[in-house]
Amino acid sequence: MSAANDKQRRIVPIGPYHPLQEEPEFFKLVVEGEKVVDIEIHLGYNHRGHEFISPELTYDQVPFLVERICGICSNSHPLAAVMAVEDICNLEIPERAKYLRVIVHELERIHSHLLWVGLAGHFIGYNTVWMWAWKYRDAVLDVFEMLVGNRNHYAMNKPGGVRHDLKPEMVGPIEAAMAEVEKKTWLLTKAVLDDPVIHARLEGVGILTHEQSLAYSCLGPTSRASGVPGDVRKDEPHAAYPYLDWNVITFPEGDVFAKAKVRLLEIIESVKMVRQCLKQIPDGPIEARVEEVPPGEGCGRTEAPRGEVFHYMRSDGTNRPLRHKVRAPSYMNIASNKVACVGGTIADAAITLAAVDPCYCCTERMAAFENGQQRYSWNELLRLSWEKTESIRRGMKK
Amino acid sequence: MIGWTGWRLAFSLLIFPGFLFTVLVGFVLSWVDRLVTARVQFRKGPPFIQPFADFFKLMLKQTIVPEGASALVFLFAPMLGVIAMTVATVILWNASFGGSGFVGDVLVLVYLFALPPLGLIIGASASRNPLAAVGASREMTLYFGYEFPFLLALLVPIIKSGGQVQLEALVAAQAGAPFLGSVSGVIAAIIVLLVTQAKLGLVPFDTAEAEQEIMTGVYTEYSGVALAMFKLTRAMMMVVMPLFLVTVLWGGFASWWAILKFLAIIVLVVLIRNTNPRLRVDQALRFFWFGLGGLGIVAVILALAGI
């Protein structure tokens, strides 16, 4: 590339394997000394072909598949997918199921945001915050274990309702965990707001303005920290969200500090929501029976911890989807690093890249083109994938 | 023929209080550092043997010289710090327990303390790795940053002892009351403590090896024995720097209480390390020049006024 030929400039590679992020990705930082003057974003190291596998599965199996798109927001994808199926069927789910969906969804947001706070601390070299935030997050994982049997991959949603009911004896422990999380989150929030060194590291760093956020179609906390009040839970009320009283947290600054504040305060809002759900949840069935999925198409939108998750499904009347399309929020958010990172130092770039809370395995897409023609068809890709698996298996037997 | 003096010198350099002793104490201290850090972070921490095991594991690993790097410079650079710290520890030890001190040994120490970062910069630059190059430039910036307040802080005991530049004389001048008992002494001690933090490459001044930004920066290409030498230097500095602070500002090692002083400094270093995020290199530079530099000038003026 031409920039690299310039003598003043140097490439600092972040990736494909780098301690900054736990997943493979590649950010090519073009630097002059410490200053980042350009950035190239290369994704595509972690493609797993979920949209591809989905039409091979039945509607009951699809939620288990899409749950594995992301280990952290593993409720958002199945929720959006089953909402798409319900959209096709024009199905109204029972009230109790709506509340249960919200409880799990908000618990997931709490643990995901705490996870980010910890990671952000790690990325600016503050390992104590990392360990502390993750310890506090553990209480939420314990709640999940009690509620659904798993600490991650909750398998809560199914077309027509949810799989696990809330038993009366669970309410107490969940309330206790929420009180603990709320207390510790305030502790972390105050620590972040009071620490002058954290201010120095995060304030005015990696600014994404309101206009840039709109231009890059940023989603979730990334956009809300730039003053864009978009939130699917408010914009398109689903599940039990319309019955709850809560606020969309926005800050106008657009820097990493604002993103941290948005996430920390959203944890408090989520705690509020879980409490209201526990109080208001009505008795009744937890699922509606889905007799058959008629031909048609539907989409499901929900607010994952990182922003809007969008699932589209088309049915031809069989028990498998004909087409399943997924759009994860990180796909939009990661691109905004192009403007957010340039102009800062390498140290700023590291935390800015992490501030969108990127999730690469949600994000990967693949299409191979050659001379303007698509290189592989659907079936050819499938055959290639099977051949690869077979060859690995043969290799393992030796 | 090597006479009695020669053997004594060899013993003091290689065994006690030189190389071997410092290394052993250094490993124990790095274990303390890791254990306290772990406990602060709700973790269990490594067993006592861990730093030793880490070192011997590295010694057995293959040492790879990157393609295109100058092998001589690349492999010699880690030794600079080890040699410098060995000499420094002998000089410091002699100051408290009598021996072969000499006029101007304080200034020699300043030069010896400059060698470990120099070794890092040379080694990293010789490795031809872009991340190591960024690390080297950061290390250099940091070095120029902390050297200025460090020298100012060092002026305080020299002024207070009436212009003595010999460690033995500095310790003798503190026989009644250590310099730390005065305002200028406290300021100087704070500066030396924070400079120690930077020299040890600990948070908030670990910019040269910020793993989340530039892998391990200066150490990126190092492996095996060469990396072990850097770790060794780090462990020895963990002994030498607090020793230096105790000697020039806190009354030297006159009694067994000095061990407590020594441990207090280590605990402070570990606490600072665990309660701060990493500063950017430009922020660190500004902190050292304008923050600590300004404080240092105040300390020197106070010392001249006898406060």
Image (tube, rainbow, N blue to C red):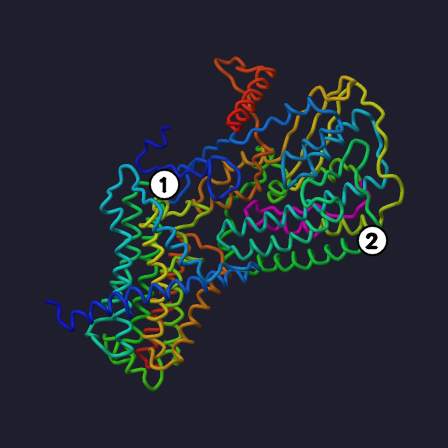
Q: Which mark is residue A169?
A: 2
Q: Is residue A397 above or below residue A219?
A: above
Q: Quadrant of residue B186?
A: bottom left
User: Which chain's residue wears label 1?
Assistant: A
Q: Nearer the viewer, residue A98 or A198?
A: A98
Left or right for A135, reference A41: right
Residue shown at the point (55%, 21%) measured from the top left: A367
Q: Residue furthest front?
A: A398
Q: Residues within 10 Å of mark 1 (few under 14, many from 20)?
A: some
Q: Is residue A117 above or below residue B194?
A: above
Residue shown at the point (68%, 54%) measured from the top left: A139
Task: Examine the structure image and report whether residue A145 is included in the region drawn in magenta.
Answer: no
Question: Measured from the top left, where is residue A204 in percent x and y?
Answer: 51, 49
- Secondary structure beneath dot 2 equals helix
User: Which chain's residue wears label 2?
Assistant: A
Q: Quadrant of residue B149?
A: bottom left
Q: Residue furthest left?
A: B1
Q: Residues within 10 Å of mark 2 (few under 14, many from 20)?
A: few
Q: Which residues are magenta?
A: A240-268
Left or right for A384, reference B214: right
Question: Measured from the top left, where is residue A130 in percent x and y?
Answer: 56, 53
- Secondary structure beneath dot 1 equals strand
Q: Which mark is residue B271?
A: none
Q: Which mark is residue A32?
A: 1
Left or right for B285, reference A41: left
Q: Quadrant of the N terminus of chain A?
A: top left
Question: Measured from the top left, where is residue A212 in percent x and y?
Answer: 56, 36
